[in-house]
Image (cartoon, rainbow, N blue to C red):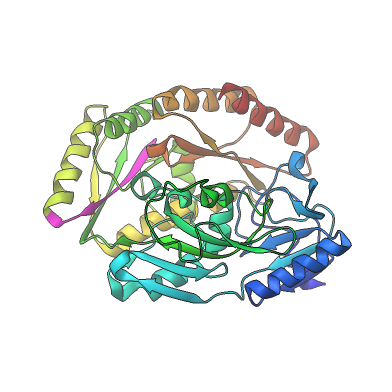
Amino acid sequence: ASVREQHGHDESYHAGHEPDVVVFAQSTDHVSQIVKYCASKHIPIIPWGTGTGLEGTDKLGFTYFLLNCIFFHIGGVTAPKGGVCLNLSRMDKIISVNPEDFDCTVQAGVTRNALNTFIRDTGLQFPIDPGANASLGGMCATSASGTMAVKYGTMRENVMNLEVVLADGSIIKTSGLKGRSRKTSAGYNLTNLFVGQEGTLGIITEATLKLHATPEAVLAAVAPFKDFQSAVDATVAIMQSGLPVARIEFLDEKMVDACNRFSKLSLDVLPTLFLEFHGSNNNIEMQGQLAEETCKSFECVKFNYETETDKRADLWKARHNAIYAAQALRPGSKAYSTDVCVPISALPGMITFAKDALKRLNLLGPIVGHVGDGNFHVFLIIDPKNAEEVERVHEYSIALAKYV
Protein backbone atom coordinates (compact mmCIF):
# COMPACT_ATOMS: atom_id res chain seq x y z
CA ALA A 1 0.00 0.00 0.00
CA SER A 2 2.82 2.44 0.84
CA VAL A 3 4.41 1.86 -2.59
CA ARG A 4 1.09 2.55 -4.31
CA GLU A 5 0.60 5.67 -2.20
CA GLN A 6 4.08 6.91 -3.13
CA HIS A 7 3.19 6.55 -6.81
CA GLY A 8 -0.14 8.36 -6.41
CA HIS A 9 1.35 11.86 -6.46
CA ASP A 10 4.34 13.87 -7.64
CA GLU A 11 5.82 17.13 -6.32
CA SER A 12 3.01 19.22 -7.76
CA TYR A 13 -0.04 20.81 -6.15
CA HIS A 14 -2.44 18.55 -8.05
CA ALA A 15 -3.99 15.58 -6.28
CA GLY A 16 -3.90 12.24 -8.00
CA HIS A 17 -5.05 8.74 -7.16
CA GLU A 18 -3.18 5.63 -6.13
CA PRO A 19 -2.57 3.22 -9.01
CA ASP A 20 -3.99 -0.26 -8.61
CA VAL A 21 -0.60 -1.85 -9.30
CA VAL A 22 3.02 -0.64 -9.45
CA VAL A 23 5.32 -2.60 -11.77
CA PHE A 24 9.09 -2.00 -11.76
CA ALA A 25 10.26 -2.46 -15.35
CA GLN A 26 13.56 -4.27 -15.91
CA SER A 27 14.11 -3.84 -19.66
CA THR A 28 12.52 -2.62 -22.88
CA ASP A 29 11.28 -6.15 -23.59
CA HIS A 30 9.74 -6.26 -20.13
CA VAL A 31 7.93 -2.96 -20.81
CA SER A 32 6.71 -4.36 -24.13
CA GLN A 33 5.29 -7.45 -22.46
CA ILE A 34 3.51 -5.36 -19.83
CA VAL A 35 2.02 -3.05 -22.47
CA LYS A 36 0.80 -5.99 -24.57
CA TYR A 37 -0.90 -7.53 -21.55
CA CYS A 38 -2.52 -4.24 -20.51
CA ALA A 39 -3.65 -3.63 -24.09
CA SER A 40 -5.39 -6.99 -24.16
CA LYS A 41 -7.25 -6.14 -20.93
CA HIS A 42 -7.80 -2.41 -21.62
CA ILE A 43 -5.87 -1.47 -18.47
CA PRO A 44 -4.54 2.12 -18.24
CA ILE A 45 -0.75 2.62 -17.93
CA ILE A 46 1.03 5.56 -16.32
CA PRO A 47 4.84 5.68 -16.86
CA TRP A 48 6.84 6.87 -13.83
CA GLY A 49 10.42 8.15 -13.65
CA THR A 50 11.30 9.77 -10.32
CA GLY A 51 8.08 11.66 -9.55
CA THR A 52 9.82 15.04 -9.35
CA GLY A 53 7.40 16.97 -11.58
CA LEU A 54 6.34 20.31 -10.10
CA GLU A 55 3.38 21.08 -12.34
CA GLY A 56 1.53 17.79 -12.57
CA THR A 57 -1.61 17.67 -14.67
CA ASP A 58 -4.54 20.03 -14.62
CA LYS A 59 -7.95 18.59 -13.76
CA LEU A 60 -8.87 19.06 -17.40
CA GLY A 61 -6.14 16.55 -18.20
CA PHE A 62 -7.42 13.86 -15.87
CA THR A 63 -8.71 11.76 -18.74
CA TYR A 64 -7.68 8.77 -20.79
CA PHE A 65 -7.82 8.23 -24.49
CA LEU A 66 -7.90 5.10 -26.58
CA LEU A 67 -4.95 4.45 -28.87
CA ASN A 68 -4.57 1.08 -30.53
CA CYS A 69 -6.70 -0.57 -27.85
CA ILE A 70 -4.76 0.74 -24.84
CA PHE A 71 -5.40 3.70 -22.60
CA PHE A 72 -2.57 6.13 -21.91
CA HIS A 73 -2.87 8.82 -19.28
CA ILE A 74 -2.89 12.32 -20.77
CA GLY A 75 0.05 14.11 -19.17
CA GLY A 76 1.84 13.81 -15.86
CA VAL A 77 2.54 10.80 -13.66
CA THR A 78 -0.40 10.86 -11.26
CA ALA A 79 -3.19 8.40 -11.95
CA PRO A 80 -6.74 9.83 -11.99
CA LYS A 81 -8.33 6.44 -11.33
CA GLY A 82 -6.03 3.52 -10.76
CA GLY A 83 -4.47 1.45 -13.50
CA VAL A 84 -0.87 0.24 -13.74
CA CYS A 85 1.96 2.57 -12.76
CA LEU A 86 5.05 1.50 -14.71
CA ASN A 87 8.12 2.57 -12.73
CA LEU A 88 11.21 2.82 -14.97
CA SER A 89 13.73 3.78 -12.26
CA ARG A 90 15.44 0.36 -12.30
CA MET A 91 16.26 0.76 -15.98
CA ASP A 92 19.31 2.81 -15.01
CA LYS A 93 22.13 1.61 -17.28
CA ILE A 94 24.36 4.04 -19.16
CA ILE A 95 24.66 2.04 -22.36
CA SER A 96 27.38 3.99 -24.16
CA VAL A 97 29.32 7.25 -24.07
CA ASN A 98 31.03 8.55 -27.22
CA PRO A 99 33.24 11.50 -26.17
CA GLU A 100 34.57 12.05 -29.69
CA ASP A 101 31.01 12.38 -31.00
CA PHE A 102 29.67 14.31 -27.99
CA ASP A 103 26.79 11.89 -27.35
CA CYS A 104 25.65 9.08 -25.09
CA THR A 105 22.88 6.49 -24.91
CA VAL A 106 21.09 5.80 -21.62
CA GLN A 107 18.14 3.86 -20.29
CA ALA A 108 15.13 5.91 -19.23
CA GLY A 109 15.73 5.53 -15.49
CA VAL A 110 19.19 7.13 -15.47
CA THR A 111 19.08 10.46 -13.64
CA ARG A 112 20.83 13.59 -14.89
CA ASN A 113 23.12 13.66 -11.82
CA ALA A 114 24.12 10.03 -12.37
CA LEU A 115 24.98 10.74 -16.00
CA ASN A 116 27.03 13.82 -15.16
CA THR A 117 28.92 11.92 -12.46
CA PHE A 118 29.64 9.09 -14.90
CA ILE A 119 31.02 11.39 -17.64
CA ARG A 120 32.84 13.83 -15.36
CA ASP A 121 36.33 12.67 -16.40
CA THR A 122 35.59 13.02 -20.12
CA GLY A 123 35.42 16.82 -20.00
CA LEU A 124 31.79 16.65 -21.08
CA GLN A 125 28.50 17.47 -19.40
CA PHE A 126 24.76 17.13 -19.90
CA PRO A 127 23.63 20.66 -19.01
CA ILE A 128 19.82 20.47 -18.98
CA ASP A 129 18.92 21.11 -15.34
CA PRO A 130 15.24 21.35 -14.41
CA GLY A 131 16.28 21.60 -10.77
CA ALA A 132 15.33 18.20 -9.42
CA ASN A 133 17.45 15.11 -10.05
CA ALA A 134 14.94 13.92 -12.62
CA SER A 135 15.16 10.78 -14.74
CA LEU A 136 16.32 11.39 -18.29
CA GLY A 137 13.36 9.43 -19.65
CA GLY A 138 11.00 11.71 -17.76
CA MET A 139 12.91 14.76 -18.97
CA CYS A 140 12.48 13.56 -22.56
CA ALA A 141 8.80 12.80 -22.03
CA THR A 142 8.12 16.30 -20.67
CA SER A 143 10.62 18.21 -22.86
CA ALA A 144 12.23 19.51 -19.69
CA SER A 145 14.01 22.83 -19.62
CA GLY A 146 16.13 24.51 -16.95
CA THR A 147 18.33 27.43 -16.00
CA MET A 148 20.84 26.78 -18.79
CA ALA A 149 18.33 26.44 -21.63
CA VAL A 150 19.23 29.92 -22.87
CA LYS A 151 22.67 28.59 -23.91
CA TYR A 152 22.23 24.84 -24.41
CA GLY A 153 18.56 24.55 -25.33
CA THR A 154 15.86 22.33 -23.81
CA MET A 155 15.55 18.56 -24.02
CA ARG A 156 13.98 18.91 -27.45
CA GLU A 157 17.23 20.30 -28.87
CA ASN A 158 19.37 17.68 -27.13
CA VAL A 159 17.66 14.38 -27.94
CA MET A 160 19.00 12.54 -31.00
CA ASN A 161 17.16 9.21 -30.83
CA LEU A 162 14.59 7.46 -28.67
CA GLU A 163 13.60 3.87 -28.10
CA VAL A 164 9.85 3.81 -27.53
CA VAL A 165 7.30 1.09 -26.72
CA LEU A 166 4.08 1.89 -28.58
CA ALA A 167 0.52 1.21 -27.46
CA ASP A 168 0.43 -2.28 -29.01
CA GLY A 169 3.75 -3.28 -27.40
CA SER A 170 5.84 -2.83 -30.55
CA ILE A 171 9.28 -1.23 -30.16
CA ILE A 172 10.63 1.52 -32.40
CA LYS A 173 13.73 3.70 -32.68
CA THR A 174 12.64 7.18 -33.69
CA SER A 175 15.83 7.95 -35.66
CA GLY A 176 16.66 4.43 -36.81
CA LEU A 177 18.57 1.57 -35.20
CA LYS A 178 21.86 3.48 -35.09
CA GLY A 179 20.49 7.00 -35.17
CA ARG A 180 23.34 9.15 -33.86
CA SER A 181 23.77 11.59 -36.72
CA ARG A 182 23.39 15.30 -35.93
CA LYS A 183 21.48 16.09 -39.09
CA THR A 184 18.84 14.33 -41.16
CA SER A 185 16.32 15.39 -43.77
CA ALA A 186 14.97 11.89 -44.36
CA GLY A 187 11.27 11.90 -43.61
CA TYR A 188 9.33 12.82 -40.49
CA ASN A 189 11.09 13.94 -37.32
CA LEU A 190 9.67 11.26 -35.03
CA THR A 191 12.12 12.08 -32.25
CA ASN A 192 10.68 15.57 -31.87
CA LEU A 193 7.18 14.11 -31.92
CA PHE A 194 7.90 11.88 -28.91
CA VAL A 195 9.80 14.52 -26.92
CA GLY A 196 7.18 16.21 -24.73
CA GLN A 197 4.34 13.74 -25.33
CA GLU A 198 4.22 12.72 -21.63
CA GLY A 199 3.57 9.05 -22.26
CA THR A 200 0.49 9.63 -24.40
CA LEU A 201 2.02 8.22 -27.60
CA GLY A 202 4.28 5.60 -26.08
CA ILE A 203 6.72 4.81 -23.28
CA ILE A 204 10.32 6.01 -23.67
CA THR A 205 12.76 3.32 -22.55
CA GLU A 206 16.08 4.56 -23.97
CA ALA A 207 17.50 7.87 -25.22
CA THR A 208 20.52 9.02 -27.20
CA LEU A 209 21.49 12.50 -26.01
CA LYS A 210 23.87 15.26 -27.03
CA LEU A 211 26.70 16.10 -24.65
CA HIS A 212 28.51 19.43 -24.34
CA ALA A 213 32.03 20.48 -23.38
CA THR A 214 32.51 21.44 -19.74
CA PRO A 215 33.54 25.12 -19.77
CA GLU A 216 37.09 26.04 -18.81
CA ALA A 217 35.85 28.82 -16.56
CA VAL A 218 32.52 29.85 -15.01
CA LEU A 219 31.52 33.25 -13.66
CA ALA A 220 28.27 34.06 -11.86
CA ALA A 221 26.81 37.43 -10.95
CA VAL A 222 23.94 38.86 -8.92
CA ALA A 223 22.28 42.08 -10.09
CA PRO A 224 19.49 43.69 -8.01
CA PHE A 225 17.36 46.43 -9.61
CA LYS A 226 15.18 49.23 -8.23
CA ASP A 227 12.07 47.70 -9.83
CA PHE A 228 11.07 44.60 -11.77
CA GLN A 229 10.49 46.53 -14.99
CA SER A 230 14.16 47.58 -15.07
CA ALA A 231 15.31 44.00 -14.42
CA VAL A 232 13.16 42.59 -17.22
CA ASP A 233 14.16 45.37 -19.62
CA ALA A 234 17.83 44.64 -18.87
CA THR A 235 17.21 40.97 -19.67
CA VAL A 236 15.72 41.86 -23.04
CA ALA A 237 18.66 44.15 -23.80
CA ILE A 238 21.23 41.48 -22.87
CA MET A 239 19.56 38.90 -25.08
CA GLN A 240 19.18 41.31 -28.00
CA SER A 241 22.88 42.23 -27.74
CA GLY A 242 23.89 38.66 -28.60
CA LEU A 243 25.86 38.22 -25.37
CA PRO A 244 26.32 34.42 -24.95
CA VAL A 245 24.97 34.24 -21.41
CA ALA A 246 24.67 30.69 -20.02
CA ARG A 247 22.08 31.49 -17.37
CA ILE A 248 19.89 34.51 -16.71
CA GLU A 249 17.23 34.05 -14.06
CA PHE A 250 14.77 36.60 -12.71
CA LEU A 251 13.50 36.67 -9.12
CA ASP A 252 11.03 39.29 -7.95
CA GLU A 253 11.38 40.88 -4.50
CA LYS A 254 9.03 38.34 -2.84
CA MET A 255 11.03 35.46 -4.28
CA VAL A 256 14.34 37.00 -3.14
CA ASP A 257 12.94 37.41 0.37
CA ALA A 258 11.80 33.78 0.39
CA CYS A 259 15.22 32.55 -0.81
CA ASN A 260 17.01 34.64 1.82
CA ARG A 261 14.95 33.01 4.56
CA PHE A 262 14.95 29.46 3.23
CA SER A 263 18.51 29.22 1.84
CA LYS A 264 20.22 31.54 4.37
CA LEU A 265 21.27 34.11 1.77
CA SER A 266 21.71 37.84 2.38
CA LEU A 267 20.61 39.34 -0.93
CA ASP A 268 19.05 42.78 -1.22
CA VAL A 269 15.27 42.31 -1.23
CA LEU A 270 14.80 43.76 -4.70
CA PRO A 271 13.92 42.36 -8.13
CA THR A 272 17.11 40.51 -9.05
CA LEU A 273 18.86 38.78 -11.92
CA PHE A 274 21.12 35.76 -11.39
CA LEU A 275 23.55 35.45 -14.31
CA GLU A 276 26.22 32.95 -15.33
CA PHE A 277 28.82 32.96 -18.10
CA HIS A 278 30.77 30.00 -19.54
CA GLY A 279 33.99 30.06 -21.55
CA SER A 280 37.71 30.80 -21.16
CA ASN A 281 38.99 33.01 -18.33
CA ASN A 282 39.47 36.02 -20.62
CA ASN A 283 36.20 35.41 -22.41
CA ILE A 284 33.96 35.26 -19.33
CA GLU A 285 35.56 38.38 -17.87
CA MET A 286 34.60 40.28 -21.02
CA GLN A 287 31.09 38.79 -20.97
CA GLY A 288 30.66 39.84 -17.35
CA GLN A 289 31.79 43.40 -18.06
CA LEU A 290 29.37 43.76 -20.97
CA ALA A 291 26.49 42.39 -18.89
CA GLU A 292 27.39 44.73 -16.03
CA GLU A 293 27.41 47.76 -18.36
CA THR A 294 24.01 46.76 -19.75
CA CYS A 295 22.47 46.20 -16.32
CA LYS A 296 23.78 49.51 -14.98
CA SER A 297 22.26 51.31 -17.96
CA PHE A 298 18.91 50.06 -16.61
CA GLU A 299 19.55 51.37 -13.09
CA CYS A 300 20.96 48.20 -11.62
CA VAL A 301 21.67 48.94 -7.93
CA LYS A 302 24.92 46.94 -7.98
CA PHE A 303 26.54 44.06 -9.84
CA ASN A 304 28.28 41.47 -7.66
CA TYR A 305 30.45 38.70 -9.12
CA GLU A 306 30.69 35.17 -7.68
CA THR A 307 33.82 33.29 -8.77
CA GLU A 308 34.13 30.74 -5.94
CA THR A 309 32.65 27.35 -6.77
CA ASP A 310 30.94 26.91 -3.38
CA LYS A 311 29.27 30.33 -3.48
CA ARG A 312 28.08 29.77 -7.03
CA ALA A 313 26.69 26.40 -6.00
CA ASP A 314 24.83 28.01 -3.07
CA LEU A 315 23.34 30.59 -5.41
CA TRP A 316 21.99 28.04 -7.88
CA LYS A 317 20.88 25.69 -5.13
CA ALA A 318 18.78 28.53 -3.76
CA ARG A 319 17.32 29.12 -7.22
CA HIS A 320 16.47 25.44 -7.67
CA ASN A 321 14.84 25.37 -4.21
CA ALA A 322 12.77 28.45 -4.99
CA ILE A 323 9.41 26.67 -4.94
CA TYR A 324 10.11 25.23 -1.47
CA ALA A 325 11.28 28.66 -0.30
CA ALA A 326 8.02 30.15 -1.55
CA GLN A 327 5.95 27.49 0.25
CA ALA A 328 7.83 28.24 3.48
CA LEU A 329 6.44 31.80 3.43
CA ARG A 330 3.12 30.27 4.46
CA PRO A 331 3.57 27.06 6.50
CA GLY A 332 1.09 24.33 5.62
CA SER A 333 0.47 25.75 2.17
CA LYS A 334 0.98 24.26 -1.28
CA ALA A 335 2.49 25.89 -4.35
CA TYR A 336 0.50 25.96 -7.57
CA SER A 337 3.06 26.66 -10.29
CA THR A 338 2.13 28.47 -13.48
CA ASP A 339 4.39 28.10 -16.52
CA VAL A 340 4.26 30.87 -19.10
CA CYS A 341 6.52 31.42 -22.10
CA VAL A 342 6.24 34.39 -24.45
CA PRO A 343 8.48 36.05 -27.04
CA ILE A 344 11.24 37.92 -25.19
CA SER A 345 9.96 41.29 -26.41
CA ALA A 346 6.58 40.54 -24.78
CA LEU A 347 8.11 39.60 -21.42
CA PRO A 348 7.92 43.02 -19.68
CA GLY A 349 4.22 43.39 -20.44
CA MET A 350 3.48 39.79 -19.47
CA ILE A 351 5.14 40.05 -16.05
CA THR A 352 3.47 43.42 -15.42
CA PHE A 353 0.10 41.80 -16.13
CA ALA A 354 0.96 38.81 -13.89
CA LYS A 355 1.85 41.05 -10.94
CA ASP A 356 -1.21 43.26 -11.40
CA ALA A 357 -3.45 40.16 -11.47
CA LEU A 358 -1.91 38.96 -8.18
CA LYS A 359 -2.92 42.24 -6.53
CA ARG A 360 -6.39 42.20 -8.06
CA LEU A 361 -7.11 38.66 -6.86
CA ASN A 362 -5.33 39.08 -3.51
CA LEU A 363 -2.94 36.16 -4.05
CA LEU A 364 0.58 35.53 -2.79
CA GLY A 365 2.72 34.60 -5.78
CA PRO A 366 6.51 34.98 -5.82
CA ILE A 367 7.82 35.07 -9.40
CA VAL A 368 10.91 33.36 -10.80
CA GLY A 369 11.88 32.42 -14.31
CA HIS A 370 14.26 31.49 -17.10
CA VAL A 371 13.71 34.92 -18.58
CA GLY A 372 16.48 34.50 -21.15
CA ASP A 373 14.02 32.54 -23.27
CA GLY A 374 10.86 34.33 -22.18
CA ASN A 375 9.79 31.75 -19.60
CA PHE A 376 8.69 32.42 -16.01
CA HIS A 377 6.75 30.84 -13.16
CA VAL A 378 4.38 32.31 -10.61
CA PHE A 379 4.31 30.14 -7.48
CA LEU A 380 0.80 30.69 -6.13
CA ILE A 381 0.94 29.88 -2.41
CA ILE A 382 -2.47 28.63 -1.34
CA ASP A 383 -4.44 26.52 1.09
CA PRO A 384 -5.84 23.65 -1.04
CA LYS A 385 -8.70 23.24 1.46
CA ASN A 386 -9.88 26.82 0.95
CA ALA A 387 -12.33 26.48 -1.94
CA GLU A 388 -12.70 30.23 -2.42
CA GLU A 389 -8.92 30.70 -2.63
CA VAL A 390 -8.57 27.78 -5.04
CA GLU A 391 -11.22 29.39 -7.25
CA ARG A 392 -9.18 32.62 -7.31
CA VAL A 393 -6.12 30.61 -8.35
CA HIS A 394 -8.04 29.08 -11.25
CA GLU A 395 -9.26 32.54 -12.23
CA TYR A 396 -5.65 33.73 -12.18
CA SER A 397 -4.47 30.86 -14.39
CA ILE A 398 -7.22 31.54 -16.91
CA ALA A 399 -6.34 35.24 -16.94
CA LEU A 400 -2.68 34.45 -17.75
CA ALA A 401 -3.69 32.05 -20.51
CA LYS A 402 -6.02 34.60 -22.08
CA TYR A 403 -3.36 37.30 -21.96
CA VAL A 404 -0.84 35.08 -23.72
Residue at the extreme right: 41
| Nearest to the observer: residue 65 or residue 53 | 65
Say which residue appears at 36% left-offset and 46% top-offset. Answer: 267
- Does 278 lie within the magenta span? yes
- Please tell me in which quadrant of the rendered image residue 97 appears: bottom left
Question: In this rendering, is residue 201 above or below 238?
Answer: below
The quarter of the rendered structure image containing the C terminus is top right
| Nearest to the observer: residue 403 or residue 232 | 403
Question: In this rendering, is residue 115 above or below 131?
Answer: below
Residue 187 in the image, given as x and y percentages of width and height:
50, 46
Residue stretch rendered in magenta on the structure: 270-281
Residue at the extreme left: 282
Please indicate, yes or no, whether residue 5 appears anywhere in the rendered image: no
- Please tell me in which quadrant of the rendered image residue 34 appears: bottom right
Say which residue appears at 35% left-offset and 61% top-offset. Answer: 313
Residue 385 in the image, given as x and y percentages of width and height:
79, 44
| Nearest to the observer: residue 306 or residue 330 | 306
The quarter of the rendered structure image containing the N terminus is bottom right
Please indicate, yes or no, whether residue 389 appears anywhere in the rendered image: yes
Say which residue appears at 27% left-offset and 34% top-offset. Answer: 238
Residue 106 in the image, given as x and y percentages of width and height:
49, 70
- Does 15 lie within the magenta span? no
Residue 358 in the image, given as x and y percentages of width and height:
59, 28
Magenta stretch, main secondary structure, is strand
| Nearest to the observer: residue 333 or residue 297 | 297
Say which residue appears at 52% left-offset and 70% top-offset. Answer: 110
